Amino acid sequence: MVIAKAGLRTFLSKKAFLGLLLISWAPFFVRAVQVYAAANFPQARQLLDVKAETFRQFLDQQNIWVFFITVYVGAGLIANDRRANALQLYLSKPLTRAEYVLGKLAILGTFLLLVTWVPAIVLLILQVMFAGNLTFVKANLYLFPAITLFSFVQVLTVSAAMLALSSLSTSSRFVGILYTALIFFTTALWGVLAFALGLQHAEAGAGRPGVSWISPSADLAQVGDAIFRVPLRYDSPWLLSLVMIILLVAVSGLVLERRVRGVEIVA
Amino acid sequence: MTTPDVERAGVVSADHLSKWYGQVIGLNDVSLTVPAGITGLLGPNGAGKSTFMKLVTGQLKPSKGGITVLGEPIWRNPQLYFRIGFCPEQDAFYDRMTGLEWVAALSRLNGVGESEALAMARRALDMVDLADAAGKKIGAYSKGMRQRVKMAQALAHDPDLLILDEPLSGMDPIARRKTIRLIKDWGRAGKSVIVSSHILHEIESMTSNILLINQGRILAEGNVHQIRDLIDEHPHTVYIKADHTRALAREFLAFDDVLSLKFEDEAVVVQTGRPDAFYARLTELAASGSLGTIHEVTSPDDNLQAVFQYLVKA
């Protein structure tokens, strides 16, 4: 808790970060206007109707902010402690390695939930308020658990991967580049493989298994589609994407277990 | 364990303790009991002092054997960390934080509230004579101030056992004297201290109870005086960074125990046959301020290494 509190306070005291958080809510305000218009102006419904997919699209739109906040907040979370040699002092206090990692996860996770789960849920509440009835929510009872489940899966995956990368270096800048490279490289690799194997990764239903599972971003999108019960966007089975996500989280955990130590052992 | 029990069993007890890093042996089959009070851990760099201290603080898992601290096994026993204060050899700071913020932040990890942590940090900084610089960023601290702020975080929560890894390294003579006094006061107050150094003179000024360690083995434990004469036979090298190194060198030439001196960068490097007398006069010089400020005093461990080689051969 101490680690999480101190980290949250550090970032909330930075004007640049508060600005980033504020901008990341811009899509929410646009969607709020859409919800309002759809609820109050029947003629606007044709163009701006709010459906269950709207919430899936909203979370999709937030991906870019998830990326920026992950890099801004996450890159230095462990790397800076390693550079400052602070881990040996932290872990000589009554603080376990698990508590330290969970504290760091809580910092990144809180900010990521602030741009995913929180605005999506507020949007759902706004829909009820503007409509003045529960018809939409009753018709889409799965929405609240879907938003919650997807947001938490996304936040856990992204946070664990970023923390693992952050534990590998003492330079937050390098970690940021590494994370960006990981996202873009896996996406590029997926494109190249799809092209080489004659699989069109952007189109579902080609009847052949795709290779989108190579990209963590695509895996999250695929699992998100499955959670929101919308048509899958890629050919890979969503279960395979889920396995890849679990694998990524497990590998990240393993890396953290080996790297977060008070004493760096060089044999 | 009650205090008398701990006094009987020792604050640290190692039983055939070994630690190796792959093929490299850090500590080799060490069995010992560290009594309550101040104990000096003396050995050259790479002797296994830091490995031993990290095993005592529970940061390393023994490869073989066992270790108990204050009567309890230390490995995976974070509750015991409440009773231990650790000051590492390496710097471990966020330069952008002030000394007060840093010590308070680390004190919070002992499970205390914010205001209590601040009070603890202020008290600890006052003890190490850094109250005036508490609001300054650590990045602007001198080497000696950095050492002292590290000590402040170790003693802020009033631990029963203080573990200090080379605490005097880089301190100026006055800070060195104050720190030695602080460590001795701590011992007099009934607390236990394990302090490591590669300089006998430093250890001797704090305690006569020492553990001699080299190549991962405890060579001797007990009273310092038995090896003292042996060590004094070897010239002791002192590296001094000051405002006016040339004036300082002129002054040193008048000391009959100074065997040689030379200049390196902005420092003067002195070889002395009687480190005690030399350090005493150096402290007086620093206190008088007549030759400007003495910023840093360090000693390489070559002379001690020579003694250890002699001991091992013998």
Image: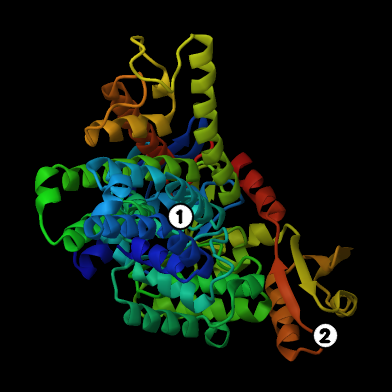
**Numbered circles on residues, count:** 2
Where does label 1 land, which residue?
A: A88
- State whether discs 2 and 1 lie on one chain: no
- In the picture, measured across the screen, residue A3 lies left or right of residue A147, that is right
Looking at the picture, which amino acid does disc 1 mark?
A: Gln
- Quarter the N terminus of chain A occupies: bottom left
Determine crowd level at label 1: few under 14, some 14-19, many 20+ residues with C-alpha closer than 10 A.
many
Asked if residue B193 is positioned above or below residue B218 in the image, the reply reads: below
Task: Return the x and y of residue B250 as percentages of the image width and height.
Answer: 90, 78
- Locate residue A116, reporting x and y percent: 33, 51
Q: Are marks 2 and 1 in contact (CB under 8 Å)?
A: no
Q: Position of residue B117 (x, y in %)?
A: 36, 77
Q: Which residue is mark 2?
A: B291
Closest to the camera, between mark 2 and mark 1, is 1
- Disc 2 and disc 1: Cα gap in Å? 39 Å
Quadrant position of residue B294: bottom right
Instruction: Point out residue B149 in the picture as x, y percentages from the top left corner.
Output: 53, 73
Compared across the picture, whether A39 is left or right of B199 comes to left
Output the chain of dot 1: A
